[in-house]
Amino acid sequence: MQIVMILVPLVLIVVGLGVLLFSWAVKSGQYDDLEGPAHRILYDDDKDMIPEEARVDKKPDDEEEPKS
């Protein structure tokens, strides 16, 4: 019975701490944009990370435009 007298206040403190942390997260904007990061992963921004010499979409430097 003595363990209940220790665990009940301990559980109440932990639950209160969880509620405070959750309310702080909501107030600081942690849950404002839930879908943005999920959609951002689909954007193709790999071209900035590929080195110039490894790109396949660039024109070689020695190739010149034909003159008319």
Image (cartoon, helix red, strand yellow):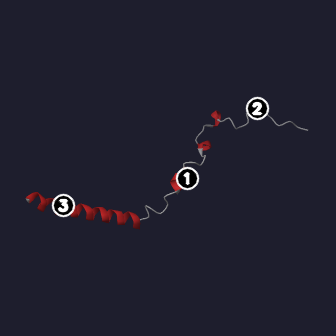
Residue at left 30%, top 61%?
Answer: 18
Please give the name of the residue rendered at 40% of the width and 65% of the height, measured from the top-left corner. Answer: 26
Question: Mark 3 falls on what kind of element?
Answer: helix
Tag 3 or tag 2, which sits nearer the N-term?
Answer: 3
Badge 1 is on which residue? 39
Determine contact: label 2, label 1, CB under 8 Å: no
Q: Residue at x 21, y 60 (%)?
A: 11
The percent coordinates of residue 59 (x first, y second) are 73, 36
Amino acid of disc 2: Asp
Q: In the shown orientation, is residue 58 left or right of residue 4?
A: right
Q: Which residue is outermost to the left?
A: 2
Report x, y in % for residue 68.
Answer: 91, 38
Residues under labels 2 and 3: Cα distance?
74 Å
Q: Which of the pair 68/49 is nearer the observer?
A: 49
Q: Earlier in the sequence, mark 2 or mark 1?
A: 1
Residue 10: assigned label: 3
Q: Earlier in the sequence, mark 1 or mark 3?
A: 3
Q: Residues within 10 Å of mark 3 (few under 14, many from 20)?
A: few
